[in-house]
Image: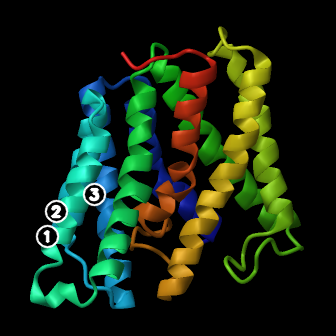
Amino acid sequence: MNPVLKRILVSIIPVSLAVYTLLFAPLWFFLIVVEALVLLALNEYVDMVEIKGVPVSRFAILFFGALLPVSVVWSSGFLVIAMTCLSLFILDFKKRMHQHALVSTAVSIFGIIYISWFFSCLVKIRMFDHGVSWAFFTVFLVKMGDAGAYFVGIRYGKQKLIETVSPNKSVEGALGGLAMTMVLAFISKIYLWHVPVYHLLILGFFTGILAQLGDLVESLIKRDVGVKDSGHVPGLGGVLDVLDSLLLTTPFVFYYVSTFLGENPL
């Protein structure tokens, strides 16, 4: 089967779930979906860390990673991070862990912050006064930017972007993805009618760049570990492969919108 057609067919169910979750679901359902994605992505991250030979506690990473999306609802994320650091160091007292305490703790905290805390910002975005629109804006721009980069890269890609990190990505694809996010940011004035166009274009520009940087960051991790995909979802790779371009964009959108546009979580 054509790989493009296979990717489209495999994406039908998750895309339908994403549309329902973003536009129609209540906050509690939105939170459950975020929790599920965080846990699946963290589990894949631990798999890659173990391939690298770094001893970590899967239970601790998943447990504290699961606490963060819930904690943002009560604005207690920093408390969870502090508890996580303390608990991970206590676990390092175990004989199996203490010889690798620094690396183990650093890798564990990085994974929790990189995946769980960053992606939890989507819950904060959903809690804005116009949260449904902003959550849709964030995910729609990022994933359509991914699609734009993919299809432009296939059709016109010649010059490699960073071949040592991700050999299949091209400069042309990157520019195509950025152009797509800029166009969609401008069009989003239709449903974010209260937001000045220049703010939408700034958000579109930085979202387009950060999404591709997020993709490259995960590619760098996979290349270091020596795997092609983070997981085994047919046609998509892994859950972390799906989320990677959102992990750097969601914190940016949250802080930009809350700082410069005065949106506050309910």
Q: Name the residue under label 3.
A: 39
Q: Where is residue 121 in the image (x, y as percent from the top left)?
A: 43, 38
Q: Mark 2 points at which residue?
A: 87
Question: Which numbered disc, 2 or 3, marks the residue that appears first in the sequence?
Answer: 3
| Structural distance between the alpha carbons of marks 2 and 3 | 19 Å
- Label 3 environment density (alpha carbons within 10 Å; few <14, some 14–19, many ≥20): many
Q: Residue type at mark 3: give it.
A: Leu
| Structural distance between the alpha carbons of marks 1 and 2 | 5 Å
Dot 3 falls on a residue whose secondary structure is helix
Q: Which residue is drawn at 72% across and 80% down?
A: 167
Dot 1 falls on a residue whose secondary structure is helix
Residue 32 seen by the camera: no
Q: In this view, does 144 lie to the left or right of 41?
A: right
Q: Does residue 123 lie above or below 51 as drawn?
A: above
Q: Does residue 78 lie above or below 211 as drawn?
A: above
Q: Where is residue 131 in the image (x, y as percent from the top left)?
A: 46, 21
